[in-house]
Image (cartoon, rainbow, N blue to C red):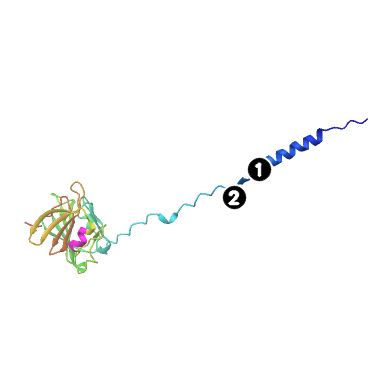
Amino acid sequence: MPRISTTRPAAAAAMFLLVGLTLSACAVPDADGAEATTPPPASEPAPDESTTTPSPAPIDPADVSTWVVAQNGIGPISRGAAYPAVVEGLPFEVVEWCAGIARMSLDDAGMTMVLDLSDDGSLVDEIWIMGQSGDGSASPATEAGIRLGASTADLTAAYPGLETIVQRGSNTWVFATPDEGDDQVSFVVDDDLVTLIGAPGQADPPKEWCS
């Protein structure tokens, strides 16, 4: 009598069971009992290239409205720069006001720039702009946007920590930014208008330029 083998049916059953287990592992039942497949991992978002820091506006030596008043200078003139080389080439008349004081007349802007020089006259120690140039649009401005002709309200809004240095008259005040040290930007306010802004070696500007 021929021998009947049971090996193939058993192997087939084992294979069927293995495939069933594999398929059931790939399908995950959801809350309703339906099978749900696992979603593919989310891709990383592309970097946002629109948040790059814009470059500062260039300074035009002939246009004082582009000049920035900062702790280390005003526009193209820096504290500690060699004088008179620093003003050569600028389209403004510079005269020696008195010993150690040079004055640059910016008539078109309705203002004057004063350079307080070192004892030997070779370096720029302090720089000031003064005047009331209409609405102030032609004046150099601080990084916070304060120009000659700004109001006291504009000044205090731009610098919440503004320090009062001294009162020089009933309507004249000297203020300075709250920076530490003696590299402060200073302001003189007359009758509620900023009439003097400086990058000084000390917060309090001189009462007289030429004594």
Residue under label 1, please give it.
24
For the residue marked with disc 1, what is the amino acid?
Ser
Q: Nearer the viewer, residue 192 or 52?
A: 192
> Is residue 151 something that shows in the picture?
yes
Residue 127: % across, % down: 18, 55
Picture residue at 64% right of the left edge, 41% below the top: 25
Q: Nearer the viewer, residue 147 or 211?
A: 147
> Is residue 99 something that shows in the picture?
no
Q: Is residue 181 above or below residue 104?
A: above
Residue under label 2, please give it.
32
Q: CA distance from mark 2 to mark 1?
A: 16 Å
Residue 2: % across, % down: 92, 31
Magenta: main secondary structure? helix
Q: Earlier in the sequence, mark 2 or mark 1?
A: 1
Q: Which residues are magenta?
A: 151-156
Horizontal side of residue 68 vs 205, given as left or right: right
Q: Is residue 42 magenta?
A: no
